[in-house]
Image: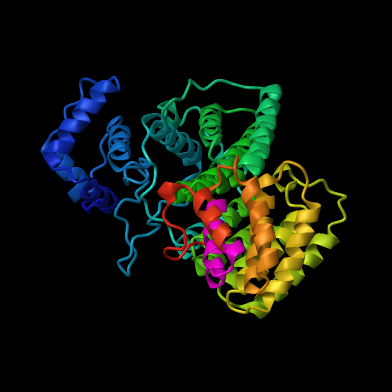
């Protein structure tokens, strides 16, 4: 107990709409269902949790996490409730602001527990058919401020890995977690191959159909990390966790679960850093930056990209640096900063061609090839064209290069290329070519579960409005309306993200 209100728990309690007595009864009932029939909570205890920051003993924090997750229809963790015994609840700076309001970075030994708890809650939402949305995104500046010093340190595995004698890991914090046991290099190789399978599926079909499988695999890896393996195996296991967390985040972003996606990106950065892979941590944060541009928050994206680039370390390969620069350029384009965008893309091109290939790229960078470089350039110039229509011609050139270079299995990226190209043609007053490429995009979208393709299609629909009198374009508009999911809203209504 620290004598100060638990503002996190108080805020979520207000959203849930319970009375204190009702929550106490629910805690007792849920605890019994989880195998703790002896638990007896009353209204006065609930009041102390909220008003004076008392942290209840286990299993109450886990019980509360389940109750709030079910009530709010999104993942709510013990960390979100402010119930971790790290002295952070209610901790305030001299200026009165709460320090690290989003609970990052957490202590190194918490990473496996947070990972397992969060994935367990996410799986519970999947099983019970809940939506899993509705939380607020942390601003890029808030994440950057909280994680800067932490990401720039170089931890040793001995300091960061979970320890068997740590009481935190003696009692699992998550759900659907089997008892920790040692694994060998063969099992880790199988896990690494599974990541490649999931990654290929995501690139082809979008994140919707395999997201639950990825989250389930990540949950199991969290259980494995509770056992102290030899250093070389533990590092590889952290690498698997980072790769799966990035995929879980990207798939969540792909289907519109934005706060969930952001949490996975942060978990991925923690896992990568604890495995000693700072470039991987930087790439994970760059995904959060791409998400911010998609959601119309390019200033937050630039904050995150500064951290991603500086925190990646000197070992970052030129091709990885090129990829980071293309994301920064896209954010600049979203703000109409044409000169800055062109300089950043020029630097990306220089870095890309300077990579001699003498050092094999890590598995998570193998999909960023020349086609992706052109695809991101096309997206940046097409985005800039909203501010400067002359950029549309350059966007067309890069989009055509990307399409010509795309390899089999990159279906979602090809759809994005076609939409970028069609949109640039509309902006360049070439409706005939725009119609052609838009229809190629529509033909390819049938088996794709990516909500982001629908978002870009909506933005293209907006551009068709000025050609509504053309018979071909009228037909196209009808086809777009038919292709978009009915529950997603009427095309053209409101401001749609370009991501």
Is residue 311 positioned above or below 184 on the image? below
| Residue 343, image x, y percentages | 72, 75
Viewer can see residue 339: yes
Q: Is 464 contained in the magenta span?
A: yes
Residue 324 falls within the magenta-colored stretch: no
> In terms of depth relative to the viewer, which is nearer, 159 or 198?
198
Q: Residue at x 61, y 62 (%)?
A: 472
Name which quarter of the figure residue 350 lies in: bottom right
Picture mark count: 0
Q: Residue at x 75, y 64 (%)?
A: 398
Q: Quadrant of the N terminus?
A: top left
Q: Quadrant of residue 495?
A: bottom left
Q: Is residue 338 above or below residue 180?
A: below
141 vs 3, left or right, is right
Give the magenta-colored segment's residue range. 453-473
Residue 49 image offset from top left, x and y in percent: 21, 44
């Amino acid at each position: 107990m620290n004598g100060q209100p638990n503002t996190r728990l108080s805020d979520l309690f207000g959203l849930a709409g319970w009375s204190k007595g009702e929550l106490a009864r629910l805690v007792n009932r849920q605890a019994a269902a989880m195998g703790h029939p002896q638990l007896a909570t009353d209204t006065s205890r609930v009041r102390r949790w909220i008003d004076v920051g008392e942290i209840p003993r286990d299993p109450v924090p886990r019980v509360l996490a389940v109750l709030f997750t079910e009530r709010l229809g999104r993942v709510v963790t013990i960390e979100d409730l402010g119930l971790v015994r790290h002295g952070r609840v209610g901790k305030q700076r001299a200026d009165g602001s709460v320090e690290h309001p989003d609970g990052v970075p957490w202590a190194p030994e918490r990473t496996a527990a947070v990972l397992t708890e969060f994935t367990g809650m996410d799986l519970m939402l999947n099983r019970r058919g809940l939506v899993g949305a509705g939380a607020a995104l942390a601003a890029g500046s808030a994440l950057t401020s909280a994680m800067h010093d932490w990401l720039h340190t170089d931890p040793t595995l001995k300091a960061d890995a979970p320890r068997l004698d740590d009481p935190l890991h003696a009692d699992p914090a998550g759900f659907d977690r089997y008892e920790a046991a040692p694994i060998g290099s063969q099992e880790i190789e199988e896990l690494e191959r599974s990541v490649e399978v999931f990654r290929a599926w995501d690139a082809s079909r979008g994140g919707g159909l395999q997201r639950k499988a990825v989250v389930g695999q990540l949950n199991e890896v969290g259980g494995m990390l509770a056992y102290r393996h030899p250093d070389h195996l533990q590092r590889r296991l952290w690498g698997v966790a980072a790769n799966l967390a990035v995929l879980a985040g990207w798939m969540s972003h792909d289907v519109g679960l934005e706060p969930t996606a952001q949490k996975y990106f942060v978990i991925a950065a923690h896992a990568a850093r604890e495995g000693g892979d700072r470039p991987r941590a930087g790439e994970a944060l760059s995904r959060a930056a791409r998400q911010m541009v998609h959601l119309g928050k390019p200033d937050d994206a630039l904050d995150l990209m500064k951290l991603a680039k500086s925190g990646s370390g000197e070992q970052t390969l030129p091709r990885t640096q090129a990829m980071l620069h293309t994301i920064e350029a896209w954010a600049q384009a979203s703000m109409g900063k044409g000169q800055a965008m062109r300089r950043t893309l020029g630097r990306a091109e220089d870095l890309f061609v300077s990579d001699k290939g003498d050092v094999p790229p890590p598995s998570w960078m193998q999909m960023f090839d020349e086609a992706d470089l052109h695809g991101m350039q096309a997206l940046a110039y097409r985005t800039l064209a909203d501010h400067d229509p002359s950029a549309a011609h350059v966007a067309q050139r890069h989009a055509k290069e990307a399409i010509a270079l795309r390899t089999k299995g990159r279906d979602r990226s090809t759809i994005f290329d076609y939409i970028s190209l069609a949109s640039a043609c509309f902006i360049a007053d070439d409706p005939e070519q725009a119609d052609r490429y838009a229809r190629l995009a529509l033909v390819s979208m049938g088996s794709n579960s990516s909500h982001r393709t629908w978002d870009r299609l909506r933005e293209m629909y907006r551009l068709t409005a000025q050609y509504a009198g053309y018979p071909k374009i009228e037909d196209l508009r009808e086809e777009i309306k038919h292709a978009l999911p009915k529950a997603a809203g009427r095309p053209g209504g409101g401001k749609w993200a370009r991501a």
